[in-house]
Amino acid sequence: MSEALLGTAPPPAEEGGGLELDDLDRALIRATQAGLPLVPRPYHALALDLGTTPEEVMRRLVRMEHMGAIRRIGAVPNHYRLGYRANGMSVWDIPDEQVAEAGRLLARSGLVSHCYERPRVPPVWPYNLFAMVHGRRREEVEAQVARLRELLGERVRRYAVLYSTRILKKTGLRLR
């Protein structure tokens, strides 16, 4: 969440590494850990449920993000419900000294949802750069990966696309 949204910068992080959360902070985390309410004004709905103001909800979320109690607030689309059923993890064998720049190129391409570096496991696994590509059909994914291949040029020693076969639900720590 942007400080500009609220017009104020968050306070500095707590000293000593401990996070000081009060009952309202914990209630706000519990109320949002499965997602924001799907209504036109989610912070207003949260405020109503928690007995506070929308401004207080936003202030606390910014503070907790700054403290590290929450990592980020953002949309997490369900690709399958949006019609993107071909999800391919493109894996790339890039020279180690070029992998950081190659990763930046992939991240800026607009064709991948996320990318990251992972260690190789020779001789079984030669790939060190991963980039997730989504499409409505495999042909779409293949075309996008071909564009990524062109973008990376001579850096690519080999690559492959691994398609998702099932959906794994990703969740973080949950408060009770």
Image: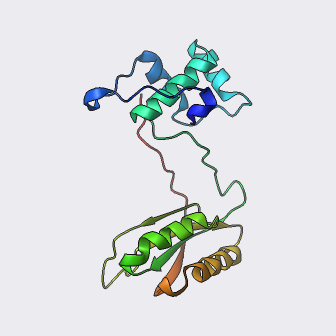
Residue 42 location in percent, x, y? Answer: 66, 28
Q: Is residue 148 left or right of residue 173?
A: right
Q: Is residue 60 left or right of residue 112?
A: left
On the picture, is 156 further left or further right than 13? right
Q: Residue at x 68, y 79 (%)?
A: 143
Where's residue 57, x and y in %?
56, 22
Quarter of the picture holding the C terminus: top left
From the viewer's side, name the closer residue of 126 and 82. Answer: 126
Horizontal and vertical percent position of residue 111: 64, 67
Q: Farthest residue in the left direction?
A: 16
- Tell me, yes or no, if residue 114 can be seen here: yes
Q: Is residue 152 above or below residue 134?
A: below
Display colour scheme: rainbow
Q: Residue at x 40, y 17 (%)?
A: 22
165 or 142: nearer the viewer: 142
Q: Residue at x 62, y 67 (%)?
A: 109
Which quadrant of the structure image shows residue 172?
top left
Q: Report the number of discs.
A: 0
**Residue 130 visible at all:** no
* Image quadrant assignment for residue 137: bottom right
Which percent across, then down, holds residue 68? 40, 36
Q: Is residue 22 above or below residue 129?
A: above
Name which residue lies at 55% across and 39% down. 73
Q: Is residue 89 left or right of residue 147?
A: left
Report the front residue among 85 and 105.
105
Above or below, comparing residue 157 to residue 133 in the picture = below
